Structures are given as C-alpha cells and as structure tokens.
C-alpha cells in the first residue's frame, strides 16, 4: 500500500498521533496528510507563479519528511 493510501487512513484513525519527531518538532498524521494533499492538489487561490514556488518548497520538505519516516 502506498503512503498516499496509508496516510489518509492513519490521519482518520489517529489525527493527533505523532507521525514523526525531528529536532523537537512533531507533526501529527493529520498535519502530514494536509501537507501531502496540498502538494498533490494545491488550492486555486494561490497565484500560479507563487503556486509553483510554494509547491517546490513543500515537495522538498516532504521528501525530507519521507526520508525521516523511512529511517
């Protein structure tokens, strides 16, 4: 099962449970699910030029998160 399939289930079952802890910062499953959803389907209200930059930054952050989860 892919992370994109597991994450919404985990967020539904354990919304406040910590998905990961890194340098004292905790992100819950629901926060992580919202981040992934935003990256995959960003809101239309963001200007197109800004949207590309925001998505690029969030994709990099998500890759870092994925690396921490796999460690």
Image: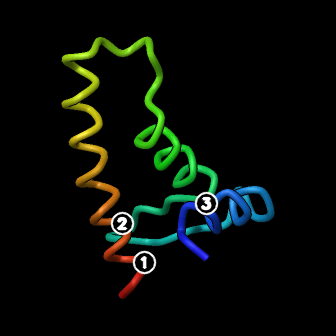
Name of the residue lying farthest toward the bottom: 71
Q: How many marks?
A: 3
Q: Earlier in the sequence, mark 3 or mark 1?
A: 3
Q: Which residue is mark 3?
A: 29
Residue 69 shows which numbered tag? 1
Q: Quadrant of the N terminus?
A: bottom right
Q: Residue at x 47, y 46 (%)?
A: 35
Evaluate if marks 3 and 2 touch, with contact meaning CB atoms under 8 Å apart: no
Q: Residue at x 58, y 59 (%)?
A: 28
Residue 45: x, y in percent?
43, 11
Mark 1 nearby-residue class (10 Å; few <14, some 14–19, many ≥20): few
As measured in the structure, the alpha-carbon distance from the residue carrying label 3 to the one carrying label 2 is 12 Å
Residue 25 occupies quadrant: bottom left
Q: Earlier in the sequence, mark 3 or mark 2?
A: 3
Evaluate if marks 2 and 1 touch, with contact meaning CB atoms under 8 Å apart: yes
Residue 14 occupies quadrant: bottom right
Q: Residue at x 42, y 78 (%)?
A: 69
Q: Is residue 21 left or right of residue 56?
A: right
Q: Secondary structure at mark 2?
A: helix
Q: Secondary structure at mark 3?
A: helix
Q: Which residue is mark 2?
A: 65
Evaluate if marks 3 and 1 touch, with contact meaning CB atoms under 8 Å apart: no
Query: Height in image: 28 above or below 55?
Result: below
């Amino acid at each position: 099962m892919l992370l994109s399939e597991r994450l919404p289930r985990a967020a539904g079952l354990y919304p406040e449970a910590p998905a990961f802890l890194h340098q004292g910062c905790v992100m819950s499953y629901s926060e992580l699910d919202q981040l992934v959803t935003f990256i995959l389907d960003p809101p239309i209200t963001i200007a197109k030029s800004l949207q590309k930059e925001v998505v690029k930054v969030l994709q990099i952050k998500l890759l870092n998160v994925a690396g921490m989860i796999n460690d």
